[in-house]
Amino acid sequence: MRSTLPTFNEVWQQQFRLDVLKQSSLLAENSTFLIGCSGGMDSMLLLHLMSQLFPGKIRAIHINHQLQSVSDDWALFVRQQCRQLNVPCMVQSVHVAGGNLENQAREARYQAYRQHLNPDEILVLAHHQQDQAETVMLRLLTGSGVRGLSAMQAVDARDWLMIWRPLLDISREQIAQWTQQLRLDYVDDPTNMDTHYDRAWCRQELWPVLQHRYPGMQQALARSSYLMQDADEILNDVLKQDLAACGHAGQLQLEKLSQLSTARQRQLLSAWMQGEHRYRPPFDMVQRLQHEVIHSRVDAQAALHWNGFYYVRFQQVLYRLDKAVYEAERSMQQVPDQQVKFLLDQSIRLDSGLFQIERMRMGLSVALLGEKLNLKHRAGGEKIHLYGRTGSRPLKKIIQDAHIFPWMRHTIQILSMDNVMLGVFTPEGFWLAQSRYCEAGGWQPDLIDG
C-alpha cells in the first residue's frame, strides 16, 4: 500500500521548497545562515536541505554539552557530515551547571550561539511540529499566559539574533520518512527516551495517551500556538498604548493605572516587570506587587524585590529601581566628617550629584573660597533656616516637602563652618542656609548632573 505521507521528492517539488523560500523572503536578501546541528535526525535533515537550497551561504555549529560518554563522538560525526556537504563547521564545548539540566543546557546553547553568530547572520534551528505542540502542552501545564502559549515562531526576531525554524510546520513522521528516503545518517540521544526529563516524559508517556483519544491533537496544538501569536501581537499593541498613558520603563502613575480594567492592569504590570528580560514574572509575583506595594498603606515603605530590581511606591508613583540604587543606603559605610575646599568654577562630585561652584546673586561669602569647610551626612534631628524663609524648620520635613525619594536621602550632606550650617547638598540641588556668611554676589554650588 502506498504511504499516505508524501515522498521527499513530491514535497520538494510541490510545497516544502516553496514554503522555505517564502519564509526566507521575510529575511534580509543577502542573509547567511548558521545552522544549529546536534547530529540528531531533525538537524541532519535540516543541514542537508539548507546545503541544497542555499549553497555557499551556510555554516554549522555543534554544541558539545559534555553530558554523554559519546559526546565527543557526536561532535566528530557532525564534522564529518559537514565536510561531505562542503559546509564549514565549528564545535563549541559548554559546561552545563547543575539544577534543571534541560533549562541549563538550553541556556548554554544560546550563549554559544550568541558568541559565534556573525552580524546579520541568521540562526537556523530544526524545531518541528511536535516540538511546537510539546512546548504548548508543557507551558500550559506550568500556567503560562498568551506569550508562553504562543510558543515558537518560524521567524523569531530577538534583540541579539534572528532565529529561523524552516521545519516548524513539518511533522516528525515526515522528517523520519524523508531522512530514510535520503539515507541520511544521524545519532540518537538516549536522553530523548529518559522520562526524568519533562520533554521526554511528554513525548513518551503523555503523547500516546492523548493522541489515542485525539488523533489530530498535534496539529491542533500547533494551530493554537499560531492563534496565540496573533493574540500576543494584539496584546503588545495594547500594552504599548497603556504604558505610554501610564508612564515608562522606570515608573508608572498609579492614578492612571487604576483607570484601566483589572485585566489590563495585571497585563501591564507583568510586561512592565519583565522589562528587557526574556520571561515575564510568575503570576503570584504580579499579585504580590499589587497587594504588598501598590495597595499598601500610604505611609508604608513597602518594596518588592524580583529579578535584580526593587519595586517601590512613593506617593502615587510606582518605581522600578535597580538593585544597586535601592540598596545603596544599606551598603554605604558610615563616612566620617570631611573637610573640603571650594574654588570658583570648580566641579565636585558628591553623593547627591555633580556640582559646580558659581557666582550667584546671593550666596556664601567669597572669603570662604579656599577655606576648609566641614561636610557630613545628616544624622537626624537637624533644623535649617533656609535663606529667604522665616524661621527654622526640621530638615526632615523640608526633605519630605521636596519629594526627595526615600532611597536617595542617604546622599544628603550638610556643609558647615565653625558649627554654623551653610547649606545642604541634596539630589534636588544645594539649599542655602541663612547665616552670617551669606552675602550679595557670593557663590553657591550649582547642581549640573544629578
Image (cartoon, helix red, strand yellow):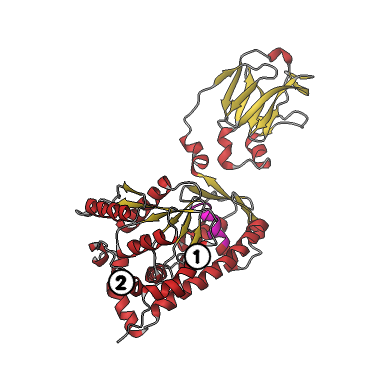
Give the numbered dot on residue 21: 1
* 438 is higher (above) or lower (below) than 208: above
Give the numbered dot on residue 166: none
Residue at 48% x, 69% y is 19
Residue kind at label 2, given as amino acid type: Gln
Find numbered disc 2 in the image and state the secondary structure of the residue it sits on: helix
Magenta stretch in the rendered image: 268-277
Residue at 46% x, 35% y is 331
Q: Tell me the quadrant of the picture where the N terminus can be found.
A: bottom left
Judged left or right of residue 215, residue 397 is right
Looking at the image, the residue that sits furthest to the left is: 69
* 362 is higher (above) or lower (below) than 274: above
Residue at 44% x, 63% y is 165
Q: Nearer the viewer, residue 265 or 33?
A: 33
Local crowd size for mark 1, using a 10 Å CA cut-off: few (<14), some (14–19), many (≥20): some
> x and y percent of residue 35 in the render?
39, 55
Q: Nearer the viewer, residue 423 or 324?
A: 324
* 131 is higher (above) or lower (below) than 84: below
Find numbered disc 1 in the image and state the secondary structure of the residue it sits on: helix
Of pointers 2 and 1, the one earlier in the residue sequence: 1
| Secondary structure mainly formed by the magenta segment | helix
> x and y percent of residue 153 in the render?
48, 64
> x and y percent of residue 330 in the render?
47, 37
> x and y percent of residue 345 in the render?
69, 19
Magenta-span inclusion, residue 328: no
Q: Which residue is mark 2?
A: 181
Q: Nearer the viewer, residue 293 or 396?
A: 293
